[in-house]
Amino acid sequence: MSTQDLVARLDWADLGRQLDEEGHALLPGLLDERQVRELAALCDAPGVGRKVSLASQDLGDGEQFHFPAAPPALVADLRAGFYRQLLPIAHRWNDTLGLAQRYPDTLEACMARQREAGQTRAQSHLSRLNAGGYAALRQYNDGEWVFPLQLVALLSAPGEDFTGGEFVMTEQRPRMQSRPMVLPLRQGDAAVIAVAQRPHQGAKGPYRVQLRHAISRVRSGQRLGLELVFHDARPA
């Protein structure tokens, strides 16, 4: 069975409920051992993509490896499969928030629209954080075309390959303190998360909340992760 078929067979009704309630949905064991090894090996593969130092951009301490326009097959299949399943949720969220934007039926068509709008800087990436490394709170919401959901996954084993390095989200509701959340990811686990904003149902109807995500400081070892974003950004 193909990767896209496996993605389609996930319980999307339950995942949609999790996303509506929390702004994230956990996918335990999404990646098998072979896929984890294949993705982790890309960090040292020649020509895998653009290498970025988090420290050089004041975004933390570690490395990101941004995928090229034609990413490796597993990455491409995951992005295409999840985009197709997340599309109805993205449109439903936009409807609830009163946003008129609609996305094409396929990721390929969506990426073409982004290129026309000048969004050519890849955001999907692998991350490598050594002891002392971290990724600061951030949102991927740069550009006219922003898809409201993304995928994150953990490629290393907590407690074995590294300690610390928790995946953290914060949610800011109007006139309220930020709510912190720690996603309990294990090796091979993934999560769908809100990129920057999502609707929340309040007593007087839905309103917009802002979300950011980060990786806490790695205390020992090395942490490898994956983030798949369904839109590119404008050139820096």
Image (cartoon, grey):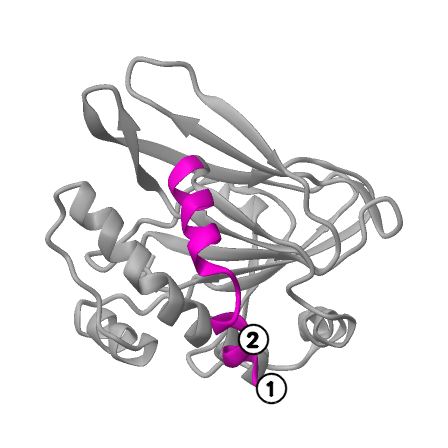
- Tell me where residue 207 appears, x and y as whole percent: 23, 29
Q: Identify the residue position indicated by label 2 in the image.
A: 6
- Tell me where residue 163 appears, x and y as whole percent: 82, 40
Chain part drawn in magenta:
1-21
How many dots with numbers?
Answer: 2
Q: Quadrant of residue 6?
A: bottom right
- Kindly indicate whether the residue at mark 2 contacts the one at mark 1 (C-beta within 8 angstroms): yes
Quick one: SS at disc 2?
helix
Q: Answer left or right for 165 relative to 47.
A: right
Q: Considering only vertical position in the picture, is 51 above or below 133?
A: below
Quick one: SS at disc 1?
loop
Crowding near pointer 2: few (<14 within 10 Å), some, many (20+)?
A: few
Tell me the quarter of the image containing the C terminus: bottom left
Residue 93 visible, this orientation: yes
Near-viewer residue (15 or 157): 15
Q: Which mark is residue 1?
A: 1
Q: Amino acid at mark 2?
A: Leu
Question: Was residue 14 drawn as part of the magenta stretch in this picture?
Answer: yes
